[in-house]
Image (spheres, rainbow, N blue to C red):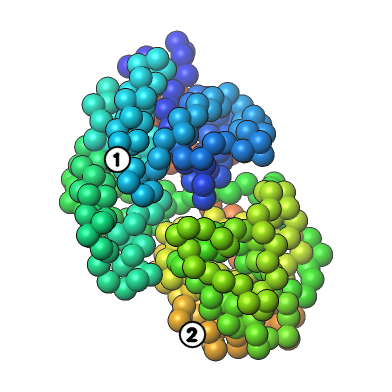
């Protein structure tokens, strides 16, 4: 393996342009660049937006290569997934990475030359299990088969929480070493401001997993207004606003950060959330957190948030109303959330990934000496 003195460690990373994987990938690439690691980001799904291109342009040394292929969880994706595989192998040939970092599953089964790391951000089968409370339909049978094929060929499997890792181990058979590496978010991007009397939520509002219906129901009986940032219309969603929640629509990263800086409370009564970057962003903004009582969120935020059973809109309303009237409790929970959030820093995330990359590629870990922690 080529040593650091000859050239930097190179990583070919895949990402989609929807959801939290994009933000995760940029945070990780930026933190890895501080360790002398070069990242080439191969994107699939919708085209990179102007805002996303601007974000990527701010990451030192990051190369973004757009593919535009369907993602494995989309409707009838398999011809496109196959074409994407050919494209990715061509990128490996031209880039010559030391590590292939896959933020999806199916392409783990490709004939890669470099060691492959698969990161389990979420999956359809675990989503279905948590949200629909039963086995998925027959239309997802091939998805499960292809995901397992990818995992079986991985050199390492990573998940952002122990809860997510346990789900993956239970649902799919694979023998690769598996570990937990928490996601991270930059403190510079999300800071507390002057808090105002309102409750905020954010994310893919159309996704049943976020359980915005419960928040909408709770909003009808509480004194503070509730605002929601994010898309609520989607072919795969059926959320219908009824006026109880003020819909802000899609916002830029800076606009979300500004709303979070002013929000006193952030609510996400999720039924399924393998990590929850929006929760971390709200915590960095010193919002008091009210979260769905599910294993992953308990794992990350126990002792620094209020937890409510996702299906209990009445208790959710009560918790939000208590926070609206109790300034001291709000301030305490906001402080605890921000303190906990410092444990999920991009620098820590990058250090763990860099250690893994070096171990798999046989590269001396002294490459990390360039890191500023």
User: Residue 155's x, y, as percent?
Assistant: 26, 36
**366 is higher (above) or lower (below) than 337:** above
Q: Is residue 122 left or right of residue 255?
A: left
SS state under label 1:
helix
Question: As rendered, which of 7 and 93 lies closer to the eye?
Answer: 93
How would you rate the neighbour count of disc 2 (Cα within 10 Å): few for under 14, some for 14-19, many for 20 or more?
some
Please state which of residues 13 and 302 is positioned toward the viewer in this rendering: 13
Kindly identify the residue that appears in the image at 29 percent across and 33 percent down. 82
Of the numbered discs 1 and 2, the one sitting upstream in the chain is: 1
Residue 81 sits above or below residue 191 on the image = above
Name the residue: 45% across, 59% down.
Answer: 236
In the rendered image, the vertical position of residue 151 relative to residue 267, given as above or below: above
| Residue 355 shown left or right of residue 205 in the figure | left
Query: SS for tag 2?
Result: loop
Quarter of the image with the N terminus is top left
> What residue would you read off at disc 2?
312
Q: Quadrant of the C terminus?
A: top right
Q: Nearer the viewer, residue 288 or 142?
A: 142
Q: How many marks?
A: 2
Name which quarter of the figure residue 279 lies in: bottom right
**Which residue has dot 1 on it?**
78
Q: CA distance from mark 1 to mark 2?
A: 39 Å
Q: Is residue 362 left or right of residue 185?
A: left
């Amino acid at each position: 393996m080529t040593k650091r003195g000859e050239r930097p460690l190179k990583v070919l990373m895949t990402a989609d342009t929807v959801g939290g994987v994009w933000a995760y990938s940029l945070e990780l690439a930026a933190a890895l660049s501080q360790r002398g690691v070069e990242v080439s980001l191969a994107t699939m799904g919708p085209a990179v937006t102007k805002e996303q291109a601007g974000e990527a342009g701010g990451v030192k040394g990051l190369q973004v290569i757009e593919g535009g292929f369907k993602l494995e969880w989309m409707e009838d994706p398999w011809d496109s997934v196959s074409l994407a595989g050919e494209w990715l192998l061509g990128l490996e040939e031209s880039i010559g990475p030391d590590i292939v970092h896959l933020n999806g599953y199916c392409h783990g089964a490709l004939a890669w030359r470099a060691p492959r790391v698969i990161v389990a951000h979420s999956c359809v089968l675990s989503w279905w299990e948590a949200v629909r409370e039963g086995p998925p339909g027959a239309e997802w049978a091939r998805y499960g088969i292809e995901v397992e094929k990818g995992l079986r060929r991985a050199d390492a499997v990573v998940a952002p929480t122990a809860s997510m890792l346990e789900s993956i181990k239970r649902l799919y058979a694979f023998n690769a070493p598996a570990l937990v590496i928490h996601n991270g978010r930059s403190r510079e991007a999300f800071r507390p401001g002057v808090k105002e009397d309102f409750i905020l939520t954010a994310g893919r509002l159309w996704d049943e997993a976020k359980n915005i219906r419960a928040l909408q129901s709770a909003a009808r009986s509480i004194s503070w207004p509730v605002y929601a940032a994010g898309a609520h219309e989607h072919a795969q969603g059926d959320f219908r606003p009824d006026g109880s929640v003020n819909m802000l629509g899609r916002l830029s990263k800076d606009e979300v950060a500004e709303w979070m800086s002013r929000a006193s409370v952030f609510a996400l009564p999720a039924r399924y959330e393998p990590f929850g970057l929006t929760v971390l962003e709200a915590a960095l903004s010193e919002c008091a957190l009210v979260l769905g009582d599910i294993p992953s969120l308990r794992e990350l935020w126990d002792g620094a948030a209020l937890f409510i059973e996702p299906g209990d809109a009445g208790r959710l309303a009560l918790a939000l109303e208590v926070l609206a009237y109790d300034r001291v409790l709000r301030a305490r929970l906001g402080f605890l959330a921000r303190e906990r959030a410092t444990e999920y820093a991009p620098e820590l995330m990058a250090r763990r990934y860099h250690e893994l990359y070096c171990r798999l590629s046989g590269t001396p870990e002294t490459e990390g000496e360039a890191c500023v922690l």
